[in-house]
Image (cartoon, rainbow, N blue to C red):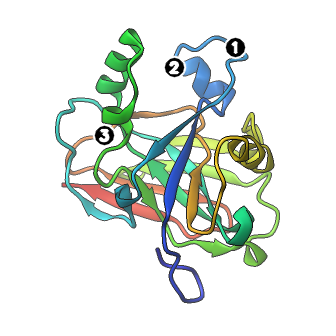
Amino acid sequence: MPVTGGGLFPVRRIFCVGKNYADHQAEMGDAKGTPPVFFTKPADAVCSGGDIPFPLATQDLHYEAELVVALGQGGAVYGYAAGCDLTRRDLQAAAKKTGAPWDTAKALDNGAVIGPITPLEACGDLREAAIRLSVNGERRQDGRLSQMIWPVTEIIDNLSAYFELQAGDLIYTGTPSGVGAIARGDRVTVSIDVLEPVSFTLV
């Protein structure tokens, strides 16, 4: 993936955090105080935006604006990017009812949209940064990174209990409230203060 200022970031693995904003937990019907959860996406799900084919096997595709953490040597933070976790919400709802895994809902082609990665030294303090998403110019999500239940350091600590994090790993850190459906022809833009925005159009 492109790095601001030049260079490329080779993607190794994609980890994701679900239920990491209390307001999103509420809109999804989860009990207050529900701990965040981890899931994964295949590395080839990563997509830098542009035109994205509407995914197969869904009638309810949702956007989720997210801060993405890019890890460098030893699992240390290399940089950050704006991203969008695309979700087949109808398949996720069906999986939840039966206790089945979320793979078909989350591990879709082009389902891990990410903008250019800004190196850590150029980011400054992102803790109070705004995270926003618009569809066809209309704002749909408007939150702050400070609303995360697990901040970045805690996410990394918790993930490290299960996996040896290495250079090339990406972490999608969860989404604030305001998620919703998108359709063919919709143009989606995710922006986070200081970071480069990312846009895509469903075709």
**Looking at the picture, how far across and down is residue 88, in whole percent?**
32, 33
Question: Is residue 189 shown to the viewer in this render?
Answer: yes
Q: Which residue is disc 1 drawn over?
A: 32
Number of residues whose C-alpha sits closer than 10 Å to that of mark 2, classed few (under 14), some (14–19) or many (20 or more): few
Q: Kindly identify the amino acid type of the residue bearing the numbered disc 1.
A: Lys
For residue 32, above or below residue 114:
above
Spatial CA distance of label 3 from label 1 is: 27 Å
Name the residue located 50 percent from the left edge and 49 percent from the top edge.
Answer: 133
Q: Secondary structure at mark 3?
A: loop
Q: Are marks 2 and 3 in contact (CB under 8 Å)?
A: no
**Mark linked to residue 28:** 2
**Mark linked to residue 182:** 3
Closer-to-camera residue (118/194) = 118
**Looking at the picture, how far across and down is residue 47, in whole percent?**
37, 62
Q: Are marks 3 and 1 in contact (CB under 8 Å)?
A: no
Closer-to-camera residue (38/141) = 38
Name the residue located 53 percent from the left edge and 76 percent from the top edge.
Answer: 9
Q: Kindly identify the amino acid type of the residue bearing the numbered disc 3.
A: Ile
Spatial CA distance of label 1 from label 2 is: 11 Å
Question: Is residue 139 shown to the viewer in this render?
Answer: no
Closer-to-camera residue (119/142) = 119
**Looking at the picture, how far across and down is residue 174, in whole percent?**
59, 41
**Looking at the picture, how far across and down is residue 178, in whole percent?**
51, 33
Q: Kindly identify the amino acid type of the residue bearing the numbered disc 2.
A: Met
Q: Earlier in the sequence, mark 3 or mark 1?
A: 1
Q: Secondary structure at mark 1?
A: loop
